[in-house]
Amino acid sequence: MSARPFTTLDAGPAGSWPHAAAGNGPVGASVRHLMDLSQFFGRGMHDWPDALTSETRRHLAGCLASIETAFAVAARDNAIGRLLTLIDGPIVWPAVQRHPHILSPEVLAHMRLRAAVGLLGGQAVRGDGDAAAEPAQGSGWLIGDDDPALVEIAAALALAEARWSSSGNASASVPADLPAENFAELVWTGAALLGTALHSGGLAERHVAMAAMTEAAYSMLARHQEEAGGFALAIRLARILRDRGRHAELLGQALAERRYLLFAALAGELADVEMEAVLDVLVHGGDAQLAALCRALGGTASDYRHLLMDLRVVRGERDDPALVRLAQNYDALQDDDVAAETVALRLPAALRAKLAMIPAVEQG
């Protein structure tokens, strides 16, 4: 990120559940996963902002609805698969709500970050965005660039961000533009639940139903285009801008426009940190982590306050005295502390997940 403050440009893991506890950073830890399930389905702790809970449910339900529809299409050439049309739907999302343990830490972690990006982007749409602004201002110049490849990626990313930020019906289908691992998990989740529904409904023997759903699942997986997903698009765009030497100048613009997916990708290139790790700090990181990241990217105390206020919708409300205290602490940050936090973010995701399960007092 640029050494200039954000406001100078202000326009207004590996492993599979349950065999591994690692996900996209600390939020993939199995202990957090159990807490998340309790909160997500209203059976216990309530440490997420209500907006983030609702939005995560909407994204997950929408992606599962899209996948269920895709199964019906993929299985229509199979005599058993066609029997899906005889079952009153929807099937998959209601079943997931009855059996939430079927979801892994990885997919919940991704959906939560995706939902957070959508919520933050939605604030720009509903808030102080200037509809009269010239398209070439801010990050808008990307769409008018001379490089057709850059324009194509920038346009696709803008469309993905718009879809994620739209406030639609809680049960409406949402394109499952997911990383390959998350898409595969939801596909196999759908296969298991739809095959079970065929069998329990008396429409097919269990092994026959599962064979039909397996065939459909493989067909869907073969057609999935991971590079068309929002996360992949943001990373590709940030790397093109890095190669052009323009990623630092766009960082503040992305933040001002609340394009947090692009912001995280650019920040990752500047700080040599994975984009998912940056997003995890923005949404779930402690105050010290967030402050260190902001400082590492060249942010001022004013930038940090702006960031804290902007992130309240996903991190929870903070009163004015708390914001003042955090800003004062930001001014007192030591370079060594910033460097230590930044180095920690560069650790492998699996290692960060394990460290997240060890009490801080034991880590010194």
Image (tube, helix red, strand yellow):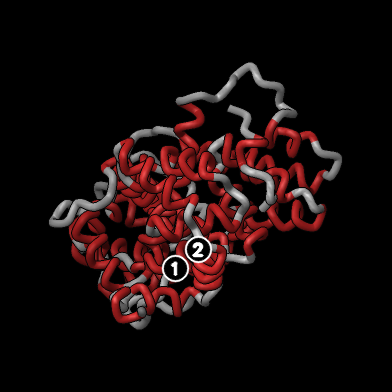
Quote the CA–CA distance across marks 1 and 2.
Answer: 6 Å
Q: Residue at x 42, y 59 (%)?
A: 288
Q: Is residue 324 left or right of residue 99?
A: right
Q: Is residue 294 left or right of residue 5?
A: left
Q: Tell me if residue 110 comes above or below residue 303 in the rendering.
A: below
Q: Percent x, y for residue 320?
A: 33, 36
Q: Between disc 1 and disc 2, whose residue precedes?
A: 1
Q: Percent x, y for residue 309?
A: 41, 38
Please state which amino acid type lies under the numbered disc 2.
Answer: Ala
| 50 vs 152, nearest the viewer | 50
Q: Is residue 207 visible?
A: no
Q: Tell me if residue 328 comes above or below residue 165 in the rendering.
A: below
| 260 vs 194, nearest the viewer | 260
Residue hosting label 1: 25
Q: Which mark is residue 277?
A: 2
Please state which amino acid type lies under the numbered disc 1.
Answer: Gly
Q: Are marks 1 and 2 in contact (CB under 8 Å)?
A: yes
Q: Is residue 44 visible?
A: yes
Q: Percent x, y for residue 336?
A: 54, 68
Image quadrant in which the C terminus is located: bottom left
Q: Is residue 348 left or right of residue 18?
A: right
In the image, farthest residue toward the right: 146
SS of the residue under disc 2: helix
- Residue 15 occupies which quadrant of the picture? bottom left
